[in-house]
Amino acid sequence: MLLLTELGARLKEARLSKGYSLDDLQEITKIQKRYLVGIEEGNYSIMPGTFYVRAFIKQYAEAVGLNPDELLEQFKTDVPGTQTEEVAQSYAQSPSRRKLSSRSSSKMMEAMPKIIVGLFIVVIIVVIWSLYLAKGNKTPDAVDNSTPPFEYDKPNIEKPKPNDKQDDEGQTAGQEDQDAQKDDEEEKPATPQQVISTGVIDGESTIYEVSGVDKLNIRVEVSGDSWVGIRNEQGAEQIDDKVYTAGMVVEHDSTEAGYARIRLGNTTVTKVFVNDIELPFAQDRVSQNIILKLVQEQ
């Protein structure tokens, strides 16, 4: 634990030299205070997962002015990695897949005789039906033409003359309906089109402007463990800042504020939607801030 103590002491010394308290550092990094204490003491067992150990150490180092890559390289043997968990999960999932495949193949082999018998029955039915139709469509070889056909006089039925007045009225009504339909189409307002700027990068933050609409509805979909927080321009929490797990969805209507600051701890397992349209990330940072500003057209 000597190297771990040295890593924690190195970070704590840099924090104190900056004049930051743990509360200050929590506000800067958005990492809970108990996790910051765990990093300084080398107590990684309280972390939400091994992935967050390295991510939180990098954020801590950046906040106090240290090079996170050099720091992690120096203490790489003492900082837990994520490969062990991934290999274990993959190994745990593999037998179940093989078992499922084996069961599917076994069920298919059991059902195969039934399928063959069913197809054979269908073929027999089709053949019998075809023979029945062919027999019913046969015509006699000879036709007795001795009886002359019966003749009759067709009655002289006069077709009613079209009513010109009714035709004129029908054409006029049809034209009026077409004109009314055109007026309705012209009066329909154009559907507003949302426009999101490409984003201005400022450190670990990216600023986007949303225009063309009058609402700012935010939805964050999480497919793995990730820290998610949404705050307004004054820094007040709009949702509970915490680690959200796979399958959870975070939603907030920031229309009234016209501003939202979204903190993402792991962008590889999160998607951000603005008014139901997915927002592409302008930078590939794992942890970053997304700032949205609603621009109202004059």
Image (tube, rainbow, N blue to C red):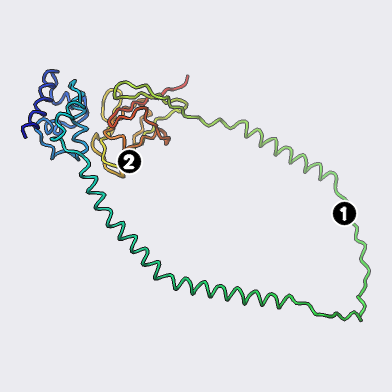
In the rendered structure, the answer to whether residue 58 lies left or right of residue 205 reads left
Residue occupying image coordinates x 78% and y 77%:
139
| Picture quadrant of residue 252 | top left
Residue occupying image coordinates x 34% and y 60%:
101
Identify the residue position indicated by label 2 in the image: 249
- Percent from the top left, x then y, of residue 60? 18, 27
The one nearer the camera, 70 or 123, is: 70
Q: Amino acid at mark 2?
A: Val
Label 1: how many residues lie within 10 Å, few (<14), some (14-19) or many (20+)?
A: few
The one nearer the camera, 89 or 156, is: 89
Q: Amino acid at mark 1?
A: Pro
- Percent from the top left, x then y, of residue 198? 41, 25
Tell me the mark number nearer the camera, choosing from 1 and 2: 2
In the rendered structure, the answer to whether residue 215 lies left or right of residue 191 reads left
Q: Which numbered disc, 1 or 2, marks the residue that appears first in the sequence?
A: 1
In the rendered structure, the answer to whether residue 115 lies left or right of residue 169 reads left
Label 2: how many residues lie within 10 Å, few (<14), some (14-19) or many (20+)?
A: some
| Picture quadrant of residue 18 | top left
Residue occupying image coordinates x 65% and y 74%:
130
The one nearer the camera, 180 or 67, is: 67
In the rendered structure, the answer to whether residue 33 lies left or right of residue 201 reads left
Q: Secondary structure at mark 2?
A: strand
User: On screen, 232 above or below 226?
Assistant: above
Quadrant containing the N terminus in the rendered view? top left
- Percent from the top left, x then y, of residue 277? 43, 35
User: On screen, 104 above or below 91?
Assistant: below
Residue occupying image coordinates x 17% and y 27%:
71
Identify the residue position indicated by label 1 in the image: 160
| Picture quadrant of residue 63 | top left
Report, in whole angstroms, how far the alpha carbon at label 1 lies from the one at label 2. 71 Å
Q: Secondary structure at mark 1?
A: loop
- Percent from the top left, x then y, of residue 107? 37, 67
